[in-house]
Amino acid sequence: MVKSLITCDCLGTQTIDASALSEATGLDVRPPCSALCTTQLDRAQAALEGGDAVFCCTQEARVFEELAEGLDRPAPPTLDLRDRAGWSADDVPKLPKMSALIAEAMLPEAPEKTVDVISEGLCLILGPADVALNAAEQLKDHLGVTVLIDDASAMPDTRAFDVVVGKLRRAAGTFGAFEVVIDALQQVEPGGRGGFGLTDPRDGAVSQCDIILDLRGQTPLFPAPDKRDGYLRADPTHAPGVAAAVMAASHMTGTFEKVLYVQTAPLLCAHSRAEQTGCTNCLDLCPTGAITSAGDHVAIDPMVCAGCGACSAACPSGAITYDAPPVDHTMQRVQTLAKAFLAAGGTAPRLLVHDAHGAEMIRLSARHGRGLPADVIPMEMSAIGAFGHAEAVAGLGAGFASVTFLPGPTTDVSALETQIALTSAIAGAGKATLLDTTDPDAMSDALYDATVPAPIAQPVRPMGTRRQITRQAAKALHPGTDQLPLPAGAPYGAVLIDTDACTLCLSCVSLCPSGALGDNSDKPQLRFQEDACLQCGLCANICPEDAITYEPRLDLTDAALRQEILNEEEPFPCIECGALFGSKSAIDRITDKLKDHAMFAGDKLRMIQMCDNCRVNAQFHATDNPFQGGEKPRVRTTEDYLSKRRDH
């Protein structure tokens, strides 16, 4: 069944060409209503009863959901055409942009992967006694409350909730599974007359809780505290903030779904080999501390991960990929938007990548300002940090003239700037920009005033890994170009060998996590495939001669896909059998260094110039063979024992 698109011109404030949209999208686009959510609600009811309909209004989604519930129908999907396209100061047709937004909305949604988190409502409250005890009084009927104070004289005469005295040493964990360590812990002894007594102080007491309400007004217990689920903070001197935190805590009991934001492939990780550290991109970026070193690879605590996506954008090997939504789905969205816009007659579209905060800015600009230009296509991401250079270059290769990033208040701007710089180096200056503003009018003005660069002449839509897509899109953006210089730290580039220093020990080959470096079993050679190199640093760190350096670049020629010889030497022939082994320079160097050594006098020096088989054979037949034992004792027989008896 063809989906029906229920449109509304919102009291005549936008123009919708239903027939043109129907032709461009292949959908059944109904003639626009004017007041679908009020006086023409009967049309909405008919559409719900008729079947598979999409309502082009997100502002009044609640009205349509309630109507569907009354009709015992599922809530209809909604699509915002008005704020993102219809309400715009541009006096040009909006058909290409609307077609693109509709085509994207028709893509199947990527299901989220979640895990259940159970909170029994055990809440630990920290802070000054007066503020913490008042918060506990409000929460005692909703949660299992324990208050930690550091002044025994402030102990209240109540057992409506638990109060303990002590010093918090540390806290770890996340929502539903916090663990705290308390020193000088004193608990209430409720018996006896007068004020409650306290137990003797005890250090290192360990306890668990589901929620931590931190009203201390001091340094947070966790990095990126606003991203740690179950950890609520407020300034104890700011009553509205404390009230909001108490209200939020009161609702944090029951079973909740925790989104699993990323997926990992440890075998691809280039973090470490043989106790040598290589790539640390994700470790350096993670704001919550969810990523830790686990030997040769990194480990991610999914319960601590807040889903900012920066690790996925920066991972050179694909060992970490964003999964909410998956990278493939994001690439598909980008390519669908560009393809539909161009197919509907548009030229030089611009992509605006934003998060939920940016979506609200777009709504405010549309209602009260100039809105978005007709050639700017907004694409909302749950985490803008997951949209890295690969996705941006893919968009430019698909036909977008530029990509603009609109960060929200929780976005790691420095990580985003690194990806923008890499995108600009690959695609060209001015192709990727950062629009860092919280003013809707300033956002609109910047987009209207921007100079639009020329888009690619022949759009491409490659498939594969992020690295493969980047390479193919870059080739399309720069036809006839062999190499693109990249900034330091880029995940693409060449390994350069100082052949005068390199001894072909091949330590680098054994540690290379991607197989970019290889050897030749038939002769002393060091081979390199540039397309596979992650520039992780492991080979340079392990090289005993410091013969390895890097050149960040993107080689677009076919040579990058082949193994090229970086260094080779003449093999050394065994002086006994002639078999080739090792390199001549290495054998000559070792022989020269040991020729005057007492332990290598005589024929022993010659053994260095023998292959393994001949060396063992020569050692075995040497007069001072360490493997040679004395004469074996004769086996005693029955006759020997009988002869001994006769002799006695």
Image (cartoon, rainbow, N blue to C red):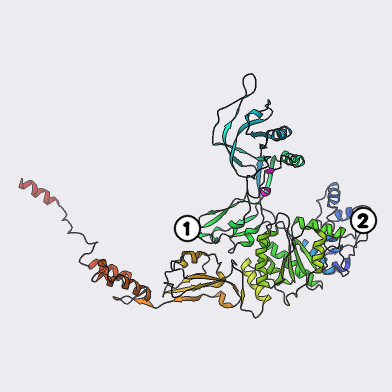
Return the residue nearer the eye: 82 or 452.
452
**Residue reaching furthest top?**
193
Tell me the tag on residue 167.
none
Q: Which residue is mark 1?
A: 275
Element type at mark 2? loop
- Do the numbered discs 2 and 1 sit on residues whose CB atoms are within 8 Å? no
Horizontally, is 450 left or right of 466 in the view?
right
Name above or below for residue 237 compared with residue 97.
Answer: above
Q: Is residue 3 visible?
A: no
Q: Which residues are magenta?
A: 221-235
Work out whether residue 121 or residue 197 is closer to the camera in this orientation and state it.
Answer: 197
The disc, 2 or 1, on the residue closer to the chain's N-terminal end is 2
In the image, residue 226 lies in the stretch drawn in magenta:
yes
**Residue 568 in view (yes/no):** yes
Left or right: residue 466 versus residue 504 is right
Residue depicted at x 72% and y 77%: 458
User: Which residue matches tag 2?
Assistant: 35
Q: Is residue 468 above or below residue 253?
A: below
Using the image, determine if residue 590 lies above or below residue 168: below
Query: In the rendered image, which quarter is residue 182 located in?
Result: top right
Residue plotted at (89% across, 67% down)? 17
Direction from residue 586 to residue 383 in the image, left or right: right
Name the quadrant of the N terminus. Answer: bottom right
Front tag of 2 and 1? 1
Depth order, front residue of 187/129: 129
x, y percent for residue 330: 70, 62
Q: Amino acid at mark 2?
A: Ala
In the displayed structure image, the side of residue 515 where residue 310 appears, left or right? right
> For the view shown, which residue lies furthest in the left direction?
647
Q: Position of residue 71 (x, y in %)?
A: 85, 48
